[in-house]
Image (spheres, rainbow, N blue to C red):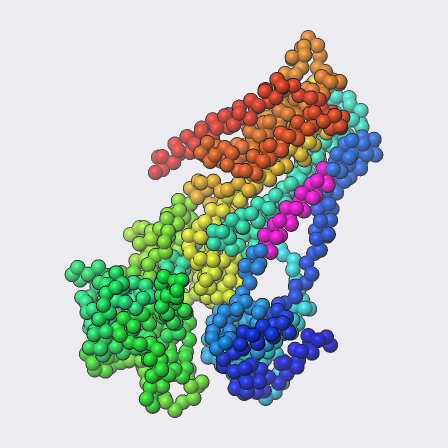
Amino acid sequence: MDASTRSRTSTVEGVHRLTADAALRTFGPGEEGLTSSQAAELLARHGPNLIREQARRPMVLVFAAEFTSPMALLLWAGGLVALVAGIVELGIAIFVVNVVNGVFGFWQEYRAERATEELKKMLSTHATVVRDGELQEVPTQDLVPGDLLAIAEGDRIGADARLVEASELQVDQSTLSGESRPVHKNAGPIAEDLPAAQLHNMVFAGTSVINGDGRAVVTATGMDTEFGRIADLTQSVREEPSPLQKELGRLTRQLSVLALGLGALFVVVAVLFVGEPWAQAFVFGLGMVVAFIPEGLLPTVTLSLAMAVQRMVRRNALVKKLSSVETLGCTTVICSDKTGTLTQNEMTVTRLWVPGVWYTVGGRGYAPVGEIRRAEPPGTGDDTGTGDSASNGDAVPDGAVAATTDPALRTLLEVAGLCNNSMVRPPGPDESRWVVHGDPTEACLLVVAAKAGLDPTALRHDHPRVRELPFDSRRKRMTTIHQVDGRRLAYVKGAPQSVPPLCSWIVRDGIRRELTEADRAEITAANDGFARLGLRVLAVAVRTVDAAADPAGYTIDDVERELTFLGLVAMEDPPREGIAEAVATCHRARIRIIMITGDYGLTAESIARSIGIVRGDEVRVVSGTELAEMSDEDLVAALRGELIFARVAPEQKYRVVATLQSMGEIVAVTGDGVNDAPALKKADIGIAMGRTGTDVSKEAADMILTDDHFASIVKAIDEGRGVYDNIRKFLTYILTSNMAEAAPSAVFLMSRGLVPLPLTVMQILTIDLGTDLLPALGLGTERPESDVMDRPPRPRTQRLMDRRVLGLAFGWYGLLEAVFALVGYLLVNVVNGWPAVPFAAEGELYARATTMTLAAIIFCQIGAVLGCRTTHASLWVIGIFSNRRIVLGIVVEILLLAALSYVPLLQDVFGTAPLLPADWAALAVLPVVMVLLDELRRWIVRRRLDARATPAA
Ligand code: ATP
C-alpha cells in the first residue's frame, strides 16, 4: 500500500457513520471553514488536488512519427532507390527534404500542442469553499482535506467530501458507477459500511450536482479520491479524428496516389516515346512523385487551426477542440438563450403590481436609488413602460413612503427580498458601480426593496430562514421557509405561469380571500401588459406551513400549494451592446437564430423583435407545453418559419436540436445549466457560458464564451469560416506550383525529347520543398476575409479540393505559371540564337535556361501567393503586403533563389547558373503581371456576383 492510499483510508474511514455535526467538527474546523494559512499548510502536505494524467506521448515519439508517416516512408524509399541507382545528389536531396519536412512538421505540431495546453489551463475549474469564515472561489486544484465546500446545482464536485448540509440534493454519479440515474443525497449518518457509490451522505470528485445544494467537508483530494483511483486504472487519451482530419487524410492519400500514378506515367512515356534510358526515366518519375506529394499539408492545417483558436480566445471564445473551429464555419442555425446571452442579465425592477394597483420604479442598475410611484396600467396614457421617472439615479428615495403607506406593496417586497440568495454591495474604492453577488434576477429584488426603504439585512435577521427549496428551471420557482414569531412562513417566487396556478388565495385591498377565476384573468392580463414591454416578470406568494415540522422534512409538493398570491415584480433586462449588429451579421451570413428561453412568450418576442431576431408578422411562439404535444412533422414544419421557443424546459432543447439536425442543419446551441448538457452534447457546436455557466454545461460544451455574449459566437463563426478558406488557399497555392513543375516535363515528353528538359528534377525539389514552404505557411494564418459573413454557410459535404480549388490551381495560376516558365526558358534560348541553333541540352547555357525556368516559377508563385490571399476582394482593398508572414516568406524565397543561382556549391548540386541583371529585371515583371491578371479575373467575378445579386435584391 503506498503512502497516498494509506492516507486516503485513514482520512475517509468511518466518516459516513458520524452525524453531520460530528463530521464537521472532526474533519473540518467547523462552520467558519479553514483559515487561509491552514489551507496553505494542508496544500503543502497533501499536494494539489489533481488527477495525475497518464504520461503523454513522449516528444521523441511525436518527433519520430513525423519521419515514419506513409509519406515520409515513401520519400525515404525514393531517396534510397536514387542512391542505389547512383544518383547520389538526388538521393541526398530527397533525404534532406524529408528531414526538413519532418522537423518543420514537428515544429508546427509542437506549437499547436502548446496552444492547446494553454487552453486547457484556461479551462481549469473553480470550487466554492468557506475559508476565513467567508465564501470564496478557489481553483479546484487548491482544494484540501478539511475544506468546507459549498455545492450548488450544476457544480462538478472537485473532491470527495462528507455532506454536512443538503437540500434537495441529487447527484449524477455516472462517472463513478456508470449509473446515469441521479442519486439523492442527504447529510444523515449511515450505520453500515457500503460501497462508495452507495454512501448517500458523501459526494465524490468528478460527479456533478443535478439538483439542490449543500455543504460538505472535503475528506480526500487528488489521487486519493475514488475518482483518482479509477482514473489510475483506466485512462484513455486517444481522440477520434475529426471530420476535417479524416478529409485531410483522404486528400493526402488521393494526392499521393496521383503523384505515384503520374510518376509511373512519366517513366513509361519517357522510356517508350522519348527513348530515355530506364535509369534516367526513373529519376524523372521520382521527381514527379516528390513534387506532387503534399508534404506540408497536415501540420500546416493543424497550425492554422491552433492560431485561429488563439485569436478566438482574444475574441472571448474558448474552443476546446481544434476541429470545432471548422464545424463553426458550417453552422447554419444558432439556438440561443435569452437571458445573459442576448440580454445583459443586469436586471432592474421597473414595475410592480399588487392586485389592482400599479407602480413604476425609478433608477437603473443596482444602486438603491429611485422612486417608487403609483402609476397607470402599462399601455395607458403617456406611459412609456420604462418607469424611468428617476433614472438619473440621484433622485430622493422617497419611494419608501409608498411602501410604508401600502402594506401590500411592503409585504410583496419583503417576501421578494427574503426569498433570495443574492447580495448587493456598494462600490469599493476602485469600482464605479454597485456590485452583485449571486443571481441578478434576485439581486434586483433586494435593490427595489431598498428603494422602498426596507433593509434586507434587518429583514433576514427578523425572519431567520430555516429551509430552502432551491430554484430549478423546470419548476421555475423557488421557496424559502422562515421563522416569524412562532410561525413558519413559506415565501415563494417564480414565473407567473408557475406560481399563480398553485395559489388558492389572494390579498386584495388588505383582505385575504379566495382566488377567483376573475382574479386569475386579472393576473394574466397584468403579466401580459408587462411582458409586452419586454419585461421579465416574477410572481410572489406566501403560505403558512407547519411550524412543528422538522425543517428537513418539508417537500416541494407539501409546501408549494394553496399559496396566497401577493403580486408581480417586473424587471427590465436591456439587450447587450452590439447585439443588433451581431444578429444582422447572422442574417447576412444566412445563419438562422432561434431563441429558446425559459422566459415568457410575450417577453421573449418583444426582445427578439427589438434586436431583430424576428422580423416578419408571422412569428410563432411555441411554449414548452405545446412543444411537448407537437408531432415531429409539426415541429419540422414550425422550424421552417420564424419562431421562438418560450417557457421551455432545458431538456426540450435536445429535441429541437435533434430535429434541426435531422433537417440537415448544422446546429450551434447555447446553454448554462445542468439540464442543458444533453443539448450541448448533441449539438454540432455546444456553447457554454464562461461566467454564469455551470461546470456541467462547460464540460459538455465544445466552446465556452468568456463574456457570455452572443456576439462572440458570431465572431467565432467568422474565424471558423476563415480557417476553412485558409486551408483551401493553402491547397490552391501548393497545387499551383505542382502544375508549373510538371508542365516543363510534359513539354519535354511531348516533344519526344526535342526540347531538352526545361526544369530538372533537383530544381523541382527546390521549389516544392524550399521556396514554397514559408509563403504557404503564411497563407494558413491569413485573417478571415471581410466578406466571409456575407456568404451562406459552406455545405458540410463540400470537399476541400473541389472544382474551384482545382480550377484555380491548375486552370488559372498553374497554367499562367507554366506558360511564363516556358517563356523564360525560351527567352534564354532565343537570345542565344534559337531557332537557328537548337536548344542547348547541356553546359552553361542549358543551366542558365533551366535556372530561368525555375526563377520564373518562383516569381510567379509570388504573384500566386498574393492572389490566393483573397477570394473576391481586390488586393488593394485588403492591403497587398498586410500579411507579414507572407512578406517574410517572399523575401526568404528570393534570397533562396539568389543563393541557388550564385553559390557555386549549390550550382553544382542543382544544375543552376548565375542569372544576369536583365534576367532579374524580366523576372520582376512576372509577379506584377500575375497580380494584375488576377485582379482582372476577380473584378469579372465580382461583377458577375453583383449582377446575380441585384435582381434577387
Ligand atoms: P433563458 O433560458 O433565456 O436564459 P431564463 O433565465 O428566463 O431565460 P431560466 O433561468 O430557466 O430561464 O428561468 C425560467 C424562469 O424561472 C424565468 O423566466 C423566471 O420566471 C423564473 N426564475 C428565474 N430565476 C428565478 C429565481 N431566482 N427565483 C424564482 N424564479 C426564477
Residue 697: tell me if it is visible.
Answer: yes
The answer to whether one can see residue 677 in this image is no
Magenta span has 362? Answer: no
- List x then y, in percent, for residue 612: 33, 51
Q: Nearer the viewer, residue 623 or 698?
A: 698
In the image, is residue 318 above or below residue 428? above
Can you tell which quarter of the image residue 920 is in? top right
Residue 622 point in image, percent of width and height? 35, 61
Look at the image and say whether residue 112 sits in the magenta stretch.
yes
Residue situated furthest top in the rendering:
836
Left or right: 358 as drawn, with respect to 812: left
- Give the position of the N terminus as an image quadrant: bottom right
Residue at the image point whose x is 27% and y is 67% from the top: 369
Q: Residue furthest front?
A: 429
On the image, the x and y values in percent for residue 437 come to 41, 69
* Range shown magenta: 97-117
x 57%, y 30%: residue:
862
Which residue does the image show at 63% across and 46% down from the upper left? 108
Residue 405 location (% of width, % of height): 19, 77
401 shown above or below 952: below
Against 291, residue 486 (above or below) is below
Total numbered circles: 0
| Residue at figure coordinates x 61%, y 43% from the top left | 300
Choose between 301 and 402: the one closer to the eye.
Answer: 402
> Is 440 in front, or is 799?
440
Question: Does residue 43 appear to the left or right of 520 in the view shown?
Answer: right
Relative placement, left or right, of 806 versus 456 is right
Q: Nearer the viewer, residue 59 or 87?
A: 59
Tell me if 690 is positioned left or right of 44 in this view: left
Q: Which quarter shows the C terminus?
A: top left
Overall secondary structure of the magenta section: helix
